[in-house]
């Protein structure tokens, strides 16, 4: 494995080399496939979900999974309202993935712009942004989100906002640090000497060169955000019923742990599997692309 | 004890230490044999990467996996080191054989006081019955190596001392149990020129005072010239030349030693220009069966394109060069 | 560290604390909905009553005045009345605080007790099966949602095996006089080992749940810093002194390897503070976290505001503490 990498080292760019290393990491590839599978399920939910996720049927209340005497039409059993758990899991994936992706995406855009501005422009811009960052770092993440959700009220849009308000700090700090370092580099000085505008230097010269740590961190953060969303939903501060989300499904099943363990257990497993897959993949990304981590 | 002059304190034969590398197993120490007599100072000279430090870490049993050490014979003061278990080897380390490392700044633990670091050796080897006793002995040791206000500075941390003082503290730590053999690994490299001489002088003094043997490992022939009784020159894991210090320096019998001498600025050769050895030492890895100095040597001939054994050339000397006689007298 | 430097750093906290309070203030003020209406609820009230209440709460004044009033009151520990309890917020919080502090401290101890030995063993026996198990375990730890882990523990150890109680802090019969508010200590002061044992059994599962993600992170930090430290010259030198392996690893290596661990531990207590809300909800633990969650649903805003501010200030101070500990552990920085 290392031999093949070494042989190609002379002819390939660091990026291509990274991809090569990533492709040779079976754990990372497996994790990526699991993640893609869940994403595909979320996207195709209306087609593949066997039932309507919100259709209640009290005759099926707490019906067990198929291998415990349930029926094939409701393979993982039903919840307290007789809704199909598998279908709710599939639809619930939409919330987890959408919140995770949107929060990290928006936070990355905001954080990158703020970090570039703080690092490159310096002066009062830097002071204002770092000041804000320091203040936001003063809040434990979940408390901040819970506080905001308490004020703004539950709902999909508010979850995304509540998490973005704090999440942008992470890419911002990374980008600011990298920009400060990049500002002194030759390629930036050259661009400046050639009369490039500040916007051009920041977005066209610096940004492409510092993007890879941001992307690596963004994947870990996505796993983190998914857990936070699930936690908020668990507390009842997430998307509102009857919309299915994994966190609220676990919460709904708590009362029936004794008689119907499946109501809480399957959504719990779903969160664990998705978050773990993303974490493993992001570890693979880091090993492949961040040369500082290698021995 | 009656035969002390003829039985060496340390005798090593066929020592080989192998590390796996990407290219294959590297014999970092390759079939090295030597001995250190009672009270003697052996100078071990070579560039970094020549295997001189690993040789002595191997003797101490401190080579970490995946490194593998093997030897035909390894005797210390009548004990067969190869037959000893880990526990018995550990009892010898620090008590009978001590080592000082190149840079005291990294060898002393930054998070522990000097007192802890000196006393723990004595306590570990039962050279002190109580902490008070150990502390008193530590102060005495610090005085011996020339640290002013030793009692007051006992509870300081290493970073609170100057470079030269730190080096002395490391030496005090190594000598805390009055070992019979001190391995001084590059004792002067990390120091300013003015302090280098002081530290060398200190080691020489302590050697006389404590009647111990010393192995002086260095890349700098100048360091061993004054101190060593005998010299062993290492190159790429092998011993390339050995003999009495004066003779080796006066007429080197291996082109590498000659090269080291030529590249050394010294008072009696001020009129000569300095000639650094061209090229670089080979990277650790599997070696072809050729003279390892081949591509850096100025005498290379067809006869050098085979593996050359270390051969005695008379007068207790040995060289690993086909042209040993010519080099020595040419 | 010199006192001057300490004071200087402490003063540096003030702008952060100020900013934190601005945000907490804005959280509440910009909330849609009229606090007076919420407070009066469905009870019928005259416009005069409403106006009086509005005046009492200072809601008739401009926003900047209200902010300074908020700060001035906060500094005196006055956060108004808890809508729900009809008592000062600060008293309600004070009642619940010890339970949360106890849970957090025990979780911290549990996290360190799991993370440090595992991290050290994983580093010393690198690439062994033990190392692999620990690495996979820490992956589980960071990927496991706390609320679900808590439920699993209850299901397995309380419901199925009956080893631990399902919820609460202590049984009724076992209650003792409150001295510190921390039951594990109060029961010992009272000399009631049976009560202590009960309190310990009650706190075990919630503390473990709270500790898990932190233990996972600290395990990784300890492992990687230990691996680095084990390569250091001073460890080799310590071995060359003929010291016992336990001393080389347990003192020479560990004392240096713990520097990042302790620093990260102090920073990670933020995850403990947030995790409190989840864990206390899952285990019915009568602490501040559950109080806040309840307050959110009863729209008891003054209490939420005070609690969020308290958490944030605690967190800022903990970060400051992390800084101090780092300096103290690292003699090279301590000048």
Image (cartoon, helix red, strand yellow):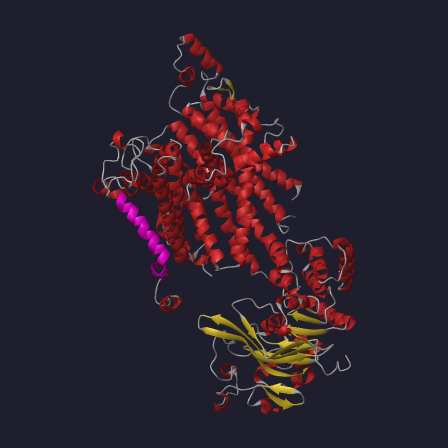
- Marks counted in the figure total 0
Point out residue A77 in the picture as x, y percentages from the top left corner. 29, 38
Q: Viewed as shown, does residue C85 lie left or right of B233?
A: left
Q: Viewed as shown, does residue A142 lie left or right of A22?
A: right
Q: Is residue B153 above or below residue A229?
A: below
Residue B82 image-quadrant placement: bottom right
Judge by depth and name the residue closer to the eye, A288 or A178.
A288
| Residue B188 visible in the displayed image | no
Judge by depth and name the residue closer to the eye, A35 or A130.
A35
B250 magenta-colored: no
Q: Quadrant of the N terminus of chain B?
A: bottom right
Residue B17 image-quadrant placement: bottom right
Q: Farthest residue in the left direction? A: A47
Point out residue B96 in the picture as x, y percentages from the top left corner. 70, 69
Residue at horizontal 64 percent and vertical 70 percent from the top: B185
Magenta region, mostly helix, strand or loop?
helix
Point out residue A7 in the picture as x, y percentages from the top left corner. 37, 69
| Residue A221 visible in the displayed image | yes
Segment tinted magenta in the rendering: A16-41
Residue at horizontal 33 percent and vertical 52 percent from the top: A32
């Amino acid at each position: 494995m290392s031999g093949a990498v070494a042989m190609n080292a002379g002819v390939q760019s660091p990026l291509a080399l990274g991809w090569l290393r990533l492709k040779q990491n079976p754990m990372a590839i497996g994790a990526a496939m699991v993640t893609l599978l869940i994403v595909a399920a979320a996207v195709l939910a209306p087609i593949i979900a066997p039932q309507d996720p919100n259709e209640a049927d009290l005759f099926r209340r707490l019906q067990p999974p198929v291998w415990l005497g349930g029926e094939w039409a409701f393979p993982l059993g039903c919840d307290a309202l007789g809704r199909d758990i598998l279908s709710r899991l599939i639809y619930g994936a939409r919330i987890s993935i959408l919140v995770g992706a949107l929060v990290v995406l928006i936070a990355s855009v905001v954080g990158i712009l703020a970090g570039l501005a703080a690092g490159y422009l310096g002066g009062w811009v830097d002071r204002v942004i770092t000041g804000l960052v320091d203040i936001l770092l003063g809040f434990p993440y979940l408390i901040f989100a819970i506080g905001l959700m308490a004020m703004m009220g539950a709902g999909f849009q508010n979850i995304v906002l509540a998490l973005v308000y704090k999440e942008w700090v992470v890419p911002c700090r990374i980008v600011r640090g990298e920009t400060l370092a990049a500002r002194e580099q030759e390629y930036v000085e050259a661009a400046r000497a050639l009369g490039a505008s500040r916007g051009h230097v920041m977005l066209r010269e610096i940004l492409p060169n510092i993007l890879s740590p941001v992307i690596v961190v963004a994947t870990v953060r996505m796993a983190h955000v998914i857990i936070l969303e699930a936690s908020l939903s668990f507390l009842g501060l997430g998307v509102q019923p009857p919309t299915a989300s994994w966190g609220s499904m676990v919460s709904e099943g708590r009362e029936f742990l004794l008689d119907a363990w499946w109501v809480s257990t399957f959504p719990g497993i779903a969160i664990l599997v998705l978050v773990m897959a993303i974490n493993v993949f992001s570890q693979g990304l880091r090993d492949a692309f961040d040369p500082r981590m290698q021995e | 004890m009656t035969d002390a002059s003829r039985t060496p304190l340390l005798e090593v034969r066929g020592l080989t230490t192998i590390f796996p590398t990407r290219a294959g197993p590297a014999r970092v120490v390759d079939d090295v044999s030597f001995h250190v007599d009672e009270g003697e100072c052996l100078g071990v000279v070579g560039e970094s990467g020549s295997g001189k430090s690993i040789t002595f870490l191997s003797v101490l049993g401190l080579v970490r996996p995946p490194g593998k050490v093997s030897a035909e014979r390894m005797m210390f003061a009548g004990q067969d080191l190869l037959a000893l278990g880990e526990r018995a080897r550990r009892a010898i380390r620090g008590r009978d054989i001590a080592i000082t490392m190149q840079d005291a700044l990294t060898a002393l633990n930054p998070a522990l006081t000097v007192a802890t670091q000196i006393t723990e050796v004595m306590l570990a080897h039962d050279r002190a019955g109580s902490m008070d006793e150990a502390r008193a002995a530590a102060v005495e040791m610090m005085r011996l190596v020339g640290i002013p206000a030793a009692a007051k500075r006992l509870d300081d941390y290493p970073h609170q001392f100057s470079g030269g003082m730190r080096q002395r503290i490391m030496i005090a730590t190594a000598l805390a149990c009055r070992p019979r053999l001190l391995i001084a690994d590059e004792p002067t490299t990390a120091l300013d020129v003015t302090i280098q001489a002081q530290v060398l002088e200190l080691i020489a003094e302590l050697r006389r005072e404590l009647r111990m043997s010393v192995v002086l490992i260095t890349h700098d022939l100048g360091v061993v010239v004054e101190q060593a009784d005998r010299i062993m020159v290492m190159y790429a894991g092998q011993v390339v030349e050995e003999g009495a210090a004066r003779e080796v320096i006066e007429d080197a019998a291996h082109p590498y030693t000659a090269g080291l001498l030529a590249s050394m600025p010294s008072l009696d050769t001020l009129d000569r220009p300095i000639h650094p050895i061209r090229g670089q030492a080979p990277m650790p890895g599997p070696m072809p069966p050729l003279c390892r100095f081949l591509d850096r040597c100025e005498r290379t001939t067809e006869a050098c394109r085979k593996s050359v054994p270390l051969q005695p050339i008379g007068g207790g000397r040995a060289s690993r060069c086909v042209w040993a006689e010519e080099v020595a007298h040419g | 560290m010199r006192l001057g430097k300490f004071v200087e750093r402490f003063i540096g906290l003030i702008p952060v604390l100020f900013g934190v309070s601005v945000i907490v203030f804005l959280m509440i003020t910009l909330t849609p909905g009229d606090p007076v209406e919420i407070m009066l609820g469905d009870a019928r009230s005259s416009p005069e009553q409403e106006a009086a209440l509005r005046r009492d709460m200072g809601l008739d004044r401009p926003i900047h005045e209200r902010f300074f009033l908020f700060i001035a009151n906060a500094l005196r520990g006055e956060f108004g009345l808890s809508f729900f309890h009809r008592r000062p917020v600060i008293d309600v919080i004070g009642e619940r605080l010890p339970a949360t502090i106890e849970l957090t401290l025990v979780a911290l101890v549990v996290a360190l007790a799991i993370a440090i030995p595992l991290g050290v063993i994983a580093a010393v026996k690198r690439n062994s099966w033990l190392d692999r198990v620990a690495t996979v375990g820490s992956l589980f730890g960071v990927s496991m949602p706390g609320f679900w882990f808590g439920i699993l523990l209850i299901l397995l150890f309380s419901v199925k095996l009956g080893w631990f109680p399902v919820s609460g802090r202590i049984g009724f019969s076992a209650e003792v006089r409150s001295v510190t508010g921390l039951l594990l200590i109060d029961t010992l002061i009272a000399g009631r080992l049976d009560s202590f044992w009960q309190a310990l059994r009650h706190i075990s599962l919630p503390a473990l749940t709270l500790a898990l993600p932190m233990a996972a992170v600290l395990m990784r930090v300890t492992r990687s810093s230990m691996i680095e430290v084990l390569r250091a010259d001073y460890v080799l030198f310590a071995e060359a002194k003929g010291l016992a392996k336990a001393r080389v690893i347990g003192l020479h290596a560990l004392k240096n390897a713990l520097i990042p661990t302790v620093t990260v531990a102090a920073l990670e207590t933020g995850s403990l503070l947030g995790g409190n809300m989840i864990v206390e909800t899952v285990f019915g633990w009568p602490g501040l976290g559950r109080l806040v969650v309840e307050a959110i649903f009863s729209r008891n805003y003054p209490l939420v505001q005070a609690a969020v501010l308290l958490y944030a200030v605690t967190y800022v101070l903990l970060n400051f503490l992390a800084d101090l500990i780092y300096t103290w552990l690292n003699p090279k920085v301590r000048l």
